Image (cartoon, rainbow, N blue to C red):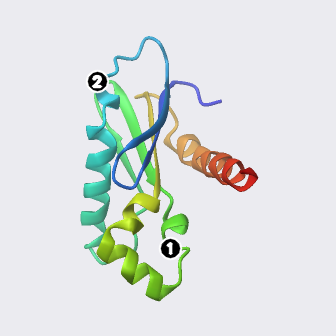
Amino acid sequence: RVPGLQAIVVSDGDGNLLMRAMHPTLHSSPIDTSLPATFALVSEQANKLRLGANSSIISFYDRYLVVQWRDLKKANAAPADEQEEEEESGAAASATLMVTFIAENTANAQMLLDMTQHVRDAFTSSGSQN
């Protein structure tokens, strides 16, 4: 449990909503599809800074703390020649799992980042059982 957590949004690499869970008092406007899609674009731009691969962005607002994370391991799991084909076709982005946590501005950002592993494990274990 993370005190102050208001919502968890899971989407694919293109920002398409896969699932979300939110506190009943949270207004749904910050959770529309523009939030994950914007993160996908900003994260790709951050990769151009040549500081390494960007996997997360933390944003502080007046009322909210937003932690956005993408699972680079899932996107980079294919062999190099397959990755080139996926990048050209856009398949690499849609294979990426993105998670957005929206919390009260007093929440602990590190606790939210630590939760990303649990979310990835939940998707990995559910996918391997099918």
| Image quadrant occupied by the N terminus | top right
Classify 10 Å Cα crowding around label 2: few (below 14), some (14-19), many (20 and above): few
Q: Callout 2: helix, strand or loop? A: helix
Q: In which quarter of the image is residue 73?
A: bottom right
Q: Which of 122 and 129 is in front in this view?
A: 129
**Placement of 50 over or under 128, stated as above or below:** below
Asked if residue 51 shows in the view, the reply is no
Residue 63 x %, y %: 33, 24
In the picture, measured across the screen, residue 59 lies left or right of residue 8, that is left
Count of numbered labels shown in the rendering:
2
Picture layout, residue 53 above or below residue 1: below
Q: Are marks 2 and 1 in contact (CB under 8 Å)?
A: no
Q: Nearer the viewer, residue 69 or 34?
A: 34
Tell me where residue 75 appears, x and y as whole percent. Answer: 48, 67
Where on the picture, by quarter, is residue 43? bottom left
The picture places residue 98, in percent across and down from the top left corner, at: 45, 50
Q: Residue sitting at 61 percent across and 45 percent down?
A: 119
* Numbered circle sitting on residue 76: 1
Q: Which amino acid does label 2 sit on?
A: Ser
Residue located at (25% from left, 56% from top) = 41
Looking at this view, name the residue that lies furthest to the front. Answer: 130
Residue at the image point whose x is 43% and y is 11% from the top: 25
The amino acid type of the residue labelled 1 equals: Asn
Residue topped by disc 2: 29
Name which of mark 2 and mark 1 comes first in the sequence. 2
Most foreground residue, 92 or 5? 92
Mark 1: secondary structure: loop
Identify the residue at horizontal 40%, vertical 71% (top origin): 53
Disc 2 versus disc 1: distance between alpha carbons? Answer: 32 Å
